[in-house]
Image: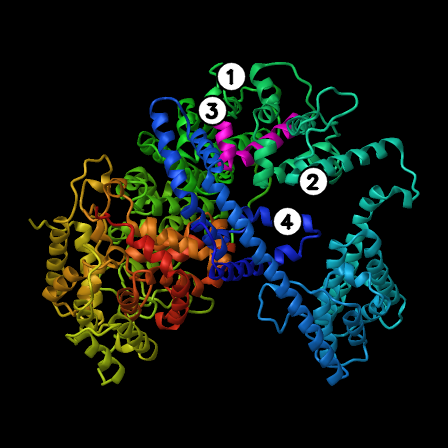
Amino acid sequence: MSHFTSEDEALLQSMLRQLLQSVKEKITGAPSVECAEEILLHLEETDENFHNYEFVKYLRQYINNTVGSVIEEETEKCTSAQNQGEVSGYDTLVQHVTKKTRESKEYREMMHALKNVMMVVVESLINKFEEDRMRNKELDGKTKNKRQSGYYTDNCSDSDSSFNQSYAFMSQEQLQLLAERLDPVQPKEVRQEALQTLCFAPPSDILNSECWPNLRKHLMMSLSDPDATFSEKILRFYAKTFSSSPFNMTREVYTSLARHLELYFLSGEYSLRISAGLDVSNTDINRLLKKVRLLNEYQKEAPSSWIRHPEKYNFSYTGPELQYIYFVHSLCLLGRLLIYKQGRNLFPVQLKNKTDGVSITDLLVLFTQLIYYSPSYPKTALAVHTDNYSPASLVMEILQVFCDQTGSAAECLYTDAVIDALLHPVQSLLSGTEMHINCLETTLIDVADILARIAAVEDGLSLLLYGENEKTAKDDSPTAVHVIVQFTKKLLHDDISLLSGSEHLPVVKGAFIFVCRQMYRTCEGLQMLIPYGLHESIGDAWKKVNLLELWCKMFFNIKMVFWVFLQFSQLKQKIVLGFIKALVTELWTLLECGKDDLRITQPKSTPVDPIDQNCQKVRNYLIFCIGMGKSAVFQIRFFTFVFLWQDIIDRLIILNSDAKIHSLFSYEQSHIFGLSGSDFWRVLGFVCLFFFPRDFIIDGLSVERNHVLVRINLIGGPQERILPLRVLNKGSDPYPWPMFSSFPLPKCYLAEIPRKAEFRQDKDLDKLLSLFKSPEKQTGWTEICRKQFCKVMKARPDIISGTSDLTFTGLLNMSSCFLGIKYLTFKQFWLLTFCARYGKYLNLLKEHAENGLCFVLMNCEKFLKKQQRTVVSSLCCLKECYAGYDWFASSVFLIMSGDGEKTLMFLQRFSRLLVSAFLWPPRLHKSMHLPITTVESGIHPVYFCSAHHIEMLLKAELPLVFSAFHMSGFTPSQICLQWITQCFWNYMDWSEICHYIAICIFLGPDYQIYMCISVFRHLQQDILKHTKDQNLQVFLKEEALHGFRVSDYLEYMESLEAIYRPMLLKDMRSIRVQNT
């Protein structure tokens, strides 16, 4: 496209208006035009929706159409030259192609055409704005004539231009009208509307207007208005004026607020007795404190105006204080200048007493040197004073701001000179060079903070790994990464003499380990760190001191530890098993030994909680490891954990002799801990059942043991099984539940057998079934079926539960999206019997249904094995068939009322659908439908696709829940994997499990994601509560989803579909092998 048509101009005008409307809050909040311009220039860095704006998409497509051929041609030339050794490096390639493209004729013509059309578009928008303003002015005059105290509308409210709504320029007549309507004698509605309009007007226009004295008077009086909402709005207007107006203007607002408070305290009616204390829960007191705080904020900002306008003030300062103020002012000014591009353009600066100019790099090196050459302060000084009077803290604030700004960081910080200055104290300590640095520990912590921030950004990480210019790097001048790792190893080995015995040494170690973490989180960074054996140094340091909590703070959560070290196969077993051994050792110490370094000066109080809080922390870490170890991500078999923890299991759970009981120092705590260890321990519950005694003493141990045994021997949702309490009641009958120590299970734990719902005729259901059976598919047949299904689901969800004909008939008519029997293991057979027992309880299966289910599972495995790849791998999960139990096939068997042939026919047809990849986890185990790289990784699409998008939507839709998971160190994907692979068995009632399967089949595979988000929304308050109690993992793994009904959240899921479906389905379809 070499030219623009009139349609293009109209389209551009609409898209530009949309862009400006989207960022109007950022623009209108800017204190000046220059700041607004800077905001727009950095919009790509600050706005996550930047690439979704239609204007940006249009420009990208236009550029691609115009100069795309030039870019491709130059890229081919450079690639050819690179192969011949004439050009090296990806960055060099990009720079060369960019340069040649900008020099091309097509680029110049494109920029000329684009500039011309944008001038026309902007001029049209400006004219449109002027027309709207004049029209609204006329309308405002008419409104004033019609009503003496009419409804005020701003100058953009009747305009059809969304762009113009972000401006509110007012004439003197409009401001005068506002002042009249803010008079306290006016009706409440009129005053509120006028105040709302006032808040959108530029403060400078208001403070400079002729009617400001009247406005000031009315606002000051209205601050005492009994309507809290009205006075809060006035206070917000004052705060806005303070932050965006010059000092000589804000003093008007300050004196108004001060006068109001003066009258308040002088008034006898509202006098306060402060000696009796202030009740901050009182609404009036709370409002008063807000006003005083705003006044105090203004007073704190006043000194900055004294520095800018010294001629207006007359104060005595001592000499040193004046020098320090001058230093602070200069530092803040220079720091602010370097943030903005125009400010950086002022450099280099020529000084009178220096031949060469001062460049940005020179200034940043000077800033860095201030960190470790700033004046020392007494160690006894309060932290608040050291922060206020320490130049290092001021420099750190500026450098931290630079790190957060991509543009300023790239031009200011990302240079070898600055990095060398930061590493100067580190280099000196490594080489043993004498140096004079005040507060060495603080300096090293500050240096590590800046290095970690630099390493967190891709460009900064590249600088640390390869230097400023990779191709000119010399072997005799190692890059920053080598210096940092060598220093970190010396720190961990306590090989820095100047730091020996320092109480802040653990903090320094943690700071530099975190810098290393920021580097080895990527493959290239890890590759450079592996030769140094940093993991061994960390392990040795851990053995010397108890660094468990420090370790977790450094790495944020256990998942990151695994993700970092499991990048390379040779480290997997050694690191993970060593890590778990250390956790088990720590656990045993806390359970049985306590802390050796605590002197017992008085008897310990009787604990209120059955398990010590320190033990709870370690238990959470272990539960996390269990969940991650059972997934395919870490490739560690479940029984590896059993092998590692066999001694703990033998000592804590299977206490089948007096010798074992007497060997425990804390028998009650240790045994309760073992019994309440979540899913892992329940695997051994079947064995434990035969070791427990038949005579019981009702105490905390027997109660917990009884709860565990009943739970592991019952399958069902929250309304389908009754679990005994885990605590004793007060009164004469503390525990009315019978003890379960041998089969059969007491009947009191079985809920009333649900009656099979009588099938009544339903017109909506009949219509849906007739649509499925119709041989001719009319236009839009799928959408018609979908709407009819949703209608039935919302109105009569009960008739869908377990209706096999509905699901089966529907699937037979759906379009496809995809394309020797072995004995069952003991674990599979054990779970099979539980599933059959559950089906009989639901009146869905008959006697001896175990044989039919066994037949289905074996034939499913045979059918899926025909579609599996042969993979040569050291991963245990790829050497065998699918390791888990096939919960989905069992669910279909129950839906089909135990008809094995019908179940297999259903699963065979179902396997052709895309949704089978996510509802039926064994379906894609080593499947030929997946790319070979995906198969070799051993990671299931449910994890890298469904669970990934669940976490992404959770952050956007339920930020409180997402933050709760982050604080707990527990990932949402872990519990979602358990829900999905287990097909929500034991978490939901059977009817809701059927609804879950139905919506995923009929409405699309993305509804699996919406389902999990809906569950999290349902559990939001519980999740927040249990995060506070530090038992979120145990709660989510053990508790059923009480009160959750799929039909109640169907409309919410539909709203999520409207937003996210295109993106989710695109990613879900992309998991399969692409046809070439």
| Magenta part of the chain | 439-465
Q: Quadrant of residue 244?
A: bottom right
Residue identifier under label 4: 37
Residue identifier under label 3: 470
In magenta segment, residue 927? no
Mark 1: few/some/many CA within 10 Å (<14, 14-19, 20+): few
Q: Earlier in the sequence, mark 2 or mark 4?
A: 4
Which amino acid type is marked by label 1?
Answer: Ser
In magenta segment, residue 454? yes
Q: Main SS type for the magenta part?
A: helix
Mark 4: few/some/many CA within 10 Å (<14, 14-19, 20+): few
Measured in 3D between alpha carbons, the distance from the residue under mark 3 to the one under mark 4, in whole angstroms, is: 34 Å
Q: Quadrant of residue 324?
A: top right
Residue 536 seen in this snapshot: no
Which amino acid type is marked by label 2?
Answer: Arg
Residue 882 seen in this snapshot: yes
Residue identifier under label 2: 336
Measured in 3D between alpha carbons, the distance from the residue under mark 2 to the one under mark 3, in whole angstroms, is: 31 Å
Dot 2: element: helix
Q: Earlier in the sequence, mark 2 or mark 1?
A: 2
Residue identifier under label 1: 477
Contact check, label 2 and label 3, Cβ < 8 Å: no
Q: Earlier in the sequence, mark 1 or mark 3?
A: 3
Measured in 3D between alpha carbons, the distance from the residue under mark 1 to the one under mark 3, in whole angstroms, is: 12 Å
Tag nearer the camera, 2 or 1: 2
Q: Residue at x 59, y 63 (%)?
A: 163
Classify residue 904 as left or right of residue 452. left
Which amino acid type is marked by label 3?
Answer: Glu
Dot 4: element: helix
Tag nearer the camera, 1 or 4: 4
Q: Quadrant of residue 569?
A: top left
